[in-house]
Amino acid sequence: SSSPTSKLKSKTSGIGLPTAVIVPHLPEKCYILDRRAYALLTLGRYDEAMADWDKVLEIDPNYANAYYNKACYFALQDRVELALENLRRAIQLEPERYRELAKTDADFDGIRGDVRFQELLAG
């Protein structure tokens, strides 16, 4: 038989945040999942990062930073349509913040020449 501790450990992600125990308050939960996703991304664990960002957006479909981070990921993968779609959503939610960030974010260097990217930044 498994103990409650072993059950909890089985739900623990590889970087140490137990999914079952992440703060129950939704804004904090979104923030923590978003940060964990970014950490997973930097470790090259892309599928896990995307799964966390998808969870964030299930909880709060207006969590702009998750869209922005997904846009960065897709831009780095040269998946232009998905990058633009996610960046567009982030900009719709928080125009000033994400237009400014995208102007200098090196993650978008590969699509910076795309007319659609330029139009998004121009508003």
Image: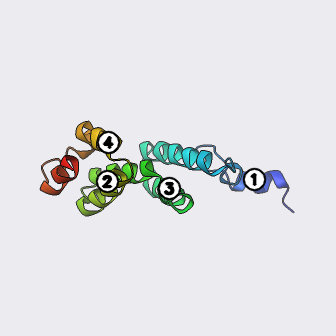
Looking at the rendered structure, the kind of residue marked 3 is: Glu
**Residue behind mark 2:** 87
The one of 43 and 50 positioned closer to us in this rendering: 50
Looking at the rendered structure, the kind of residue marked 4 is: Glu
What percent of the width, then of the height, locates residue 49?
47, 53
Q: Which mark identifies residue 48?
A: 3
Q: Quadrant of the N terminus?
A: bottom right
Assign a secondary structure to mark 4.
helix
**Counting residues from the N terminus, which is met first, the one under dot 2 or under dot 3?**
3
**Counting residues from the N terminus, which is met first, the one under dot 3 or under dot 4?**
3
**Residue behind mark 1:** 8
How crowded pointer 3 is (Cα within 10 Å; few <14, some 14-19, many 20+) is rated as some
Residue drawn at 33 percent across, 44 percent down: 98
The one of 116 and 81 positioned closer to us in this rendering: 116
Calculate the distance from the C-alpha at mark 4 to the C-alpha at mark 2.
13 Å
Residue drawn at 84 percent across, 60 percent down: 2
Residue drawn at 39 percent across, 52 percent down: 93
Looking at the rendered structure, the kind of residue marked 1 is: Leu
Q: Taking 79 as reference, is 37 left or right?
A: right
**Residue behind mark 4:** 96
Looking at the rendered structure, the kind of residue marked 2 is: Leu
